[in-house]
Image (spheres, helix red, strand yellow):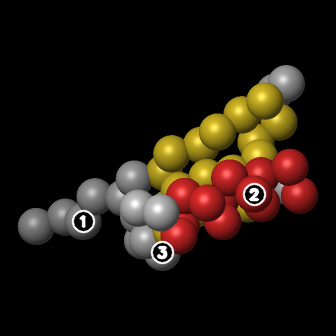
Amino acid sequence: TEDVRLLKRFMYNQEEFVYFDSDKGFYIPKTEYGRPDADSWNNNP
């Protein structure tokens, strides 16, 4: 069988600020703008 990987990206003004990687299992901020969202989503599933 093959593994499936989910990448969910969040963009604002054509810039990615946070994404979810199912291989890692949590949201990862790409910019400082995305850090509050990633922290909140990781701590409140």
- Picture mark count: 3
Q: Amino acid at mark 1?
A: Asp
Query: Spatial distance from mark 1 to mark 3, Cα to Cα?
Result: 14 Å
What residue is disc 3 on? 24
What residue is disc 2 on? 36
Q: Amino acid at mark 2?
A: Pro
Work out which residue is located at the far right of the displayed protein and give it: 32
| Place of residue 20 in the rendered image (x, y in percent of width and height, measured from the top left) | 53, 56
Q: Amino acid at mark 3?
A: Lys
* Eye-nearest disc, 2 or 1: 2
> Which of the two discs, 2 and 3, labels the residue nearer the N terminus?
3
> Which of the two discs, 2 and 1, labels the residue nearer the N terminus?
1
| Place of residue 29 in the rendered image (x, y in percent of width and height, measured from the top left) | 73, 60
What residue is disc 1 on? 3
- Determine contact: label 2, label 3, CB under 8 Å: no
| Place of residue 8 in the rendered image (x, y in percent of width and height, measured from the top left) | 51, 45
Q: Is residue 23 left or right of residue 28?
A: left
Query: Spatial distance from mark 2 to mark 1, Cα to Cα?
Result: 30 Å
Residue under the point 59% across and 43% down:
9
What is the crowding at mark 2: few (fewer than 14 residues within 10 Å), some, or many (at least 20)?
few
